[in-house]
Image: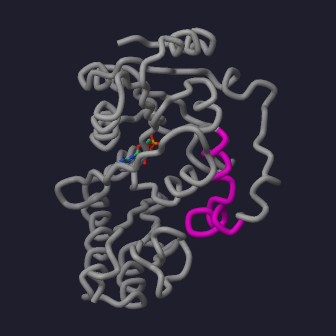
Amino acid sequence: MEIISNISEMKQWRDKGERIAFVPTMGGLHQGHLSLIDLAKKNADKVVVSIFVNPTQFAEHEDFGTYPRTMDADLVALEVSQTDLVFTPNVYDIYPDNAVLNQDEFTQDKGLFETLCGKTRPHFFYGVLQVVRRLFEIIHPDVAVFGQKDYQQLHIIKHFTSGVKIIGAPIVREHDGLAMSTRNQYLNADEHKIASKLHKILKQIEQGELELQSARERLQRYFELDYLELLDANTLKKITDNTSKIAILSAVYLNKVRLIDNIIFSKDNYV
Ligand code: AMP
């Protein structure tokens, strides 16, 4: 496995002409990330994984400074998972001159960036899109794999990047149903148990056992509720007669730790 930090070296490596699948991460790797690598392998000759904690997707008050940085363990996990190349750029190369994303391009689509997770984290999707576009520009992958756990992120990346095939990978969960996340490290054992209620409640909605409003009340017993919505999974807008897939999307806080989760299912199965 090669490890490259330098952008021109990265570009040179790329010139070999093989089919490249790319998995961007912020490190703190877990089985969820590794499942993306498995999927990437099935879609290309070589797999490139980036580890870069992207400052532009964190607000001032968020956890950029304390976000888990576990490079040594991450490199071991990547070696075991037979990653071909790890790209670990530094912030000055990714954002020379503190380049910012020009948000004018998205005026028409502001709603999508500023709804759901974007309401509480208005900077977030612009920051994600900025880094993903920059990484695509450096690596020029043929395909890139993103997790459906971050469903709105996947949706925005599919709509606002071009030239790279975007593949969504299923959510990997702990045994108790909690969606794996680097931020789960912030939870103690009791909190972890409580956190697993989020998925259980979403499942009850999917199975028609819980109405949306009752589910919101149920979530509020355990969490500070950010949002719980049932939307058209293809548009992230209201469900209409044309809706084929439904997305149950939620974000909650448990003692300041933000948890997100979702379930996507066919409207035909909705009771
Ligand atoms: P992150 O390092 O948190 O930015 O995540 C990097 C990629 O891993 C993103 O595409 C995430 O959607 C994906 N990911 C994170 N957690 C999971 C999970 N539990 N299952 C599947 N993919 C995940």
Q: Which colour scheme is used?
A: one colour
Q: Quadrant of the N terminus?
A: top left
Residue ID at (48%, 32%): 142
Q: Looking at the picture, does residue 25 appear above or below residue 178? A: above
Q: Looking at the picture, does residue 235 appear above or below residue 53? A: below
Q: How many labels does the image show?
A: 0
Q: Give the quadrant of residue 34.
A: top left
Residue ID at (56%, 9%): 12
Most common secondary structure along the magenta stretch: helix
Residue 182 rendering spot, x and y as whole percentages? 39, 44
Bounds of the magenta span?
A: 110-130
Residue ID at (62%, 15%): 7
Residue 80 rendering spot, x and y as whole percentages? 24, 22
Residue nearest the viewer, comparing 75 with 132:
132
Q: Looking at the picture, does residue 222 appear above or below residue 48? A: below
Residue 267 shown in magenta: no
Residue 127 shown in magenta: yes
Q: Looking at the picture, does residue 183 appear above or below residue 176? A: above
Residue 57 rendering spot, x and y as whole percentages? 62, 46
Query: Ligand 1 lies in which image quarter?
Result: top left
Q: Quadrant of the C terminus?
A: bottom left
Residue 160 rendering spot, x and y as whole percentages? 63, 50
Residue nearest the viewer, comparing 208 with 269:
269
Q: Give the quadrant of residue 53.
A: top right
Query: In screen coordinates, is 263 left or right of 240?
Result: left
Query: In screen coordinates, is 230 left or right of 40?
Result: right
Residue ID at (43%, 61%): 260
